[in-house]
Amino acid sequence: MVTKNYRTVTVIEATAILISTIIGVGVLALPRLAAKADNSGAPLVTVLGILVAFGGLSFITLLGMRFPNESIIEYGERILGKWPARIGSILIIVFFIVLTGLGAREFSKVVVTSVLTNTPLSVVTIVMTVLAALASRANMSTFAYSHVFYLPFVYLPGLVIDILSTKNGSLLNLQPIIGNEPQFMPIVSGSLTVAGLFQGAFVMSFVIPAMRRPEKAMTASAWGLPVAGLLYLLLVIATVAVFGPQATKLFVWPTLELAKTTMLPGEVLERLDAPFLILWVTAVFTTLYSTYSIIVRALKELFHLRDHRMFAPFVLPFVFFAAMLPPNVIQLYRVIDFVSRTGLWITFVYPMLLLCVALIRKQKDGNRVAS
């Protein structure tokens, strides 16, 4: 049960948590993923992915508003019963261990390729995962303050690049807007891949119990995900407009290439990739901070303990193992694509199932139904 003193998170802070969690390592590869799905229809694929992600977040938010004192781990047992819900909770934990590890690995690959070329990949990976583990020991108030503080450094660089790069783009590269030869299944598949980049929004299920006004949680969701999605959409539009869909598909990290072609007015800086990468590290950290926090807080509630901090070092080897499993960057993105789309069963279908059962059984707040 949540105490009054524990409720410290405001609606603005919850919104900031969503935005800075969603905007992360996937920013660099998103235009390529969208362009592969539908060529010039990449922005359409992105919009559809945002809508799918918002649907999943809506289920999580509505559940949190029905059970404002508990997270999905706790009210899952009320809705489905102890053991079925525990299976769901274990799947959540395993999924976010893998997701956190893959995010750390993708970050490390970018850093080693672009900046620290002589540094072993494993060293960069372990440094980032250790930072996320140490940060995840903080309480929810510190968690919220951290996201609010880092939000400008997460959001503004991408927005600046979007605005400055428009002068180099051509609207012809975005036509037709539904793609050159639109096919239903590739568009659906691409939109699910894009939606997978938003799965950090699952953190909302742990934020709502700490909100001062949990009944306003939908307001935070209605602002947080669309604002983050807008930046993703603008990055896709700018990248495809500048390079064209065919060239975009050839880049491993198209957004980084976009930053290289963008300069500040007056040619103060002829390339923005270096400052962009510096600030992009902050975006990756806030994402891994959130996903790692989901893991340790879920473990705490799964075992009905009072403190989540003890799990931070325990989870670290599993995250590192997941990070180092793909042998190369090609396999890495194949695994990321598979895990992201498979994870929608956990972050979209599972909350939808819980909400439907709760509505049928008329469960709300602290009301219990025998299972």
Image (cartoon, rainbow, N blue to C red):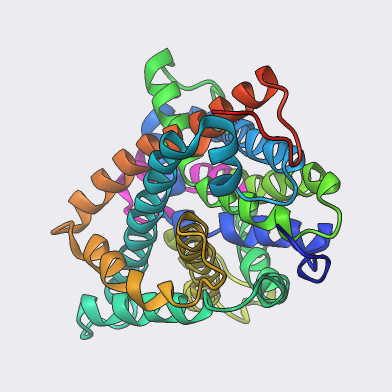
Query: Over which residues does the magenta segment extend?
Result: 234-255
Tell me if residue 48 can be seen: no
Residue 283 sits in quarter? bottom right
Q: Main secondary structure of the magenta part?
A: helix
Kindly identify the residue that appears in the image at 52 percent across and 74 percent down.
136
Q: Is residue 366 magenta?
A: no
Q: Is residue 363 above or below residue 11?
A: above
Residue 169 image position (x, y, % from top left): 57, 47
Left or right: residue 316 versus residue 137 is left
Residue 178 image position (x, y, % from top left): 53, 20
| Quadrant of the image containing the C terminus | top right
Residue 188 image position (x, y, % from top left): 44, 22
- Nearer to me, 123 or 238: 123
Q: Is residue 253 magenta?
A: yes
Residue 8 image position (x, y, % from top left): 80, 68
Kindly identify the residue that appears in the image at 22 percent across and 57 percent down.
329
- Nearer to me, 2 or 175: 2
Kindly identify the residue that appears in the image at 83 percent across and 62 percent down.
10
Outermost residue, front side: 370
Kindly identify the residue that appears in the image at 32 percent across and 54 percent down.
252
| Number of numbered discs on residues | 0
Left or right: residue 103 versus residue 354 is left
